Amino acid sequence: MKIVFVTVGTTKFEHLIETILSDNILDILKEQNFNKIILQIGNGNHQDQNLQNISREKNAAVTFKKKNLEIEAYRYKNTLKDDLNKADLVISHAGSGSIIESLEANKKLVVVCNQDLMDNHQFELAEKMAKLDYLLYTTCSSLHSTLGLLKNPHLKFKRYQPGNPRLFGNHLNKICLQ
């Protein structure tokens, strides 16, 4: 089974979820042999009737089919690690935590920037990581064409090498102990 994991993190990003559930996105995912979509929908209010009744309790989920794709949706879980590990492709909002967690799991990653946000630091991070060949980034309006790029057999992503968080701590200790 080929799985797409979509996450909006702790924010509201209804436009991304609506875009994912649109016919043209579902069609291109089917063309690329995906069978299942796991949606982490956050706290948003969604138009799709299948999503309207998801409880706000952690781990509450619904499962439904759309265009012959199995779709599992939930608002929050204690950890996204299991869903990340199952995924062949991650489509994520542009939050740094979600980006780093996906890259550390060595997942093919498409980051979707929320154009409704005033602060563009997320866009800047996504753009820089794309220039370094770690991911693709896009907006909701360009997601279909960005997903089309994944069909290119020559598209290669660099493997992300996590930093060493102890370096900062060691440096801080040195400064404080002088």
Image (cartoon, helix red, strand yellow):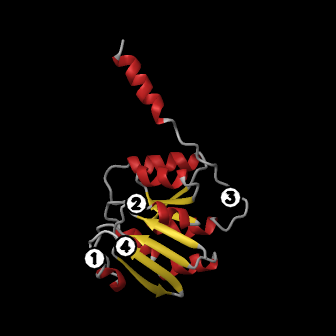
Q: Could you tell me which secondary element the residue under label 4 belongs to?
A: strand
- Mark-to-mark CA distance, 4 and 1: 8 Å
Q: Could you tell me which secondary element the residue under label 1 belongs to?
A: loop
**Residue 74: mark in rendering:** 4
Q: In which quarter of the image is the N terminus?
A: bottom right
Q: Could you tell me which secondary element the residue under label 2 belongs to?
A: loop
Instruction: Name the mark nearer the viewer: 2 or 1.
Output: 2
Mark 2 is on which residue type? Thr
Instruction: Give the residue at mark 1.
Output: 55
Mark 4 is on which residue type? Tyr
- Mark-to-mark CA distance, 3 and 1: 39 Å
**Residue 161: mark in rendering:** none
Instruction: Give the residue at mark 2.
Output: 79
**Residue 155: mark in rendering:** 3
Q: Quadrant of residue 43?
A: bottom left
The answer to whether residue 91 is seen in the rendering is: no
